[in-house]
Image: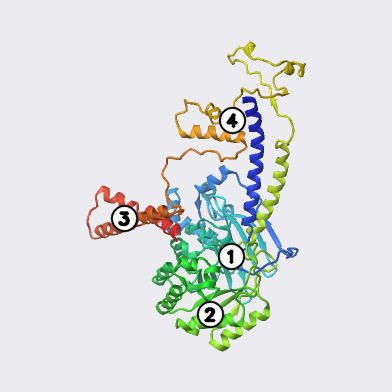
Amino acid sequence: AFILLRSRLSHAAARSAVAFVSSRSSSAKAFAVQKQRCGPPSSSSTTLQSTTTRQSLDSSPSAASSDLELFKVNLLTLPLPELETIIKSWGFPAFRARQINHWIFNQGVTDIDDMSDLPKKLRAVLKERATIGSLHLEIEQVSNDGTRKRAYKLHDGQMIESVLMPYEDGRRTACISSQAGCAMGCVFCATGQMGFARQLTSEEIYEQVARFASELKADDERLSNVVMMGMGEPLANYRNVIAAIRRMNEELGIGARKITVSTVGVVPNIRKLMDEDIQVRLALSLHCATEEERTALLPANKRYGGLHELMTTIKEYIRVKRQRVTFEWALIEGENDTPEVARTLGRLLKTYDIRPDMSHVNLIPLNPTGGYGGGPSGRKNVGKFVEVLEREFGISATPRMRRGIDIDAGCGQLTAANEKKKEKEAVAAAAELSKFAEPAGLPIVGVYEDDEGDEYDHNSVKIEPDFQESNEVDLRHGSVVQFSIDGSAVDLDDEEGADDFIDPTYDDDFEIAEAERLIALVKGVSLQPVQPVDPSPQEVKSTSIIDEDNIRDAKKRRKKLLKNLKAINKLKDMRANGKVLNEEQLEKVAKEKEWMAELESVEHNLM
């Protein structure tokens, strides 16, 4: 039976490997979709013969190298005052930090050795302890019109995308991602079809912009505009997005009114944005003008109170900020591109007293995706839609200029192309591994092992005559033999027999679970390897909203976190008024960032 177990485990391992590669292939299919919030539509038949495509030479760095990079100082995102402090702690004068900053943001240098006015000793220290950027460039494509599309790999393997779009009037606009994936679930949106992976940190958001700004400076150009219309919902990552925007404004010199934040309609955070002192522009992904249609196309519509709640908030936003709001409208052939739909949109804005001079409709030709059957509207329908809004309602409307149509410029498209390549490789690997899987109908074989030192009586092993007759050659270590299982052998399908494999000396659940997994492999059932529980505390907790009990627990935790943060604010006020806090109070104040991060995670999962 144990020889059978060992033999079957080898075959099961091969089958598990095939299943793993196949599952990656399936995941790649689900991941290889497109998102149209930034960039033009593209067709699978589009050729890239006139396109410059660059792939990183080091597309799969070693885990050790990747882990080492995490501990290096990121010169591209470190604020100048902090860089000065670090440089002084290394034994160099503070002005060296300003020189480093100048090389990166004024000269566009990406190699520390090119910082020629720094001492060799400092350059050696920087190469050992610092890096210029943490985003790993996987692929870059450059269009005939100058549009540059990049796919970055993050330190944990997640993929995000950024686009730089040049215009004839001199503008240079960067389209930036705020999340890896998206949780909003818009049915026509490729990133929404991918699902949500994680929030980007403020540094990861800022670095996308800083890279483009630095490179443009090297060519005597400047980054003039930023649109938060890449992968993810910016207002669902509110704290990190706002922190990154402030740095774009203060450190890169990009005007707040040149930065646009796009949202599907996260009403609570639109209200937060209303109270911010920074004058960024707001773009609302509306796409439908009736409650039923918008909820069907954008499930988040119902989650945040529906169309009435959203439009009431937009009206209030315009009143408070005194800014024009852009309404994004993805034109879908035969769905929302008719003159009648244009009139419904015009009446919606009029119903909520949104003045024509305080609104603008941005018409976006739909990017077809594998997960949605709709297609982009024709030029004739687009023209009629614009005409109705302008002539009958006085609302300005412009079709979005198509950029990078000869490359995968739409958000999600470059990642999709990369994933398709990986999918082909995975399929080829699966085909190769399948050669090692157990062919049906062949006899069971085992490997005879002469385990020297095992204390048992060889004479007590009963060998049947037919076995001896069919094996005239002496058995040697490693010989492959045919065999049959005696009727008295353990039946793994029998519950009592299965109990024989549970070692009563096991003293923890992990070892027992691992034994059960191995037995399951023999039975032909594929189970995931059991991972031991990591007892170390996590910095940020997140909720898993599955049922009513989990929702109730998450709400209780949110209430407790809000109470704790309120208490911290009182303690900080006391300290500001001259009161000396005791050790316990200081420990509570020190937990503010941890609790704020946990609260954001809880609130995000309750959305």
Q: Is residue 477 above or below residue 509?
A: above
Q: Residue at x 48, y 55 (%)?
A: 96
Residue toward you, 27 or 200: 27
| C-alpha separation, residue under disc 1 versus residue under disc 4 | 48 Å
Q: Secondary structure at mark 4?
A: loop
> Up-down: is 527 above or below 497?
below
Are dots 1 and 4 in contact, CB under 8 Å?
A: no
* Residue identifier under label 3: 564
Mark 1 belongs to which amino acid?
Cys
Residue pointed to by mark 4: 492
Graded by Cα atoms within 10 Å as few (under 14), some (14 to 19) or many (20 or more), the crowding at tag 2 reads: some
Q: Is residue 107 visible?
A: no
Label annotation for residue 189: 1
Q: Nearer the viewer, mark 3 or mark 4?
A: 4
Mark found first going from the N terminus, 2 or 4:
2
Residue 561: image location, x then y, percent: 34, 55
Q: Nearer the viewer, residue 513 or 133?
A: 513
Report the mark closest to the observer, 1 or 4.
Answer: 4
Residue under pointer 2: 360
Distance between mark 3 and mark 2 Cα atoms: 43 Å
Kind of residue at badge 2:
His
Residue 559 in sight here: yes
Q: CA distance from mark 2 to mark 4?
A: 69 Å
Mark closer to the chain start, 3 or 2: 2
Q: Position of residue 543 (x, y in %)?
A: 43, 52
Q: Between disc 3 and disc 4, whose residue precedes? A: 4
Quadrant of the rendered image containing residue 516: top right
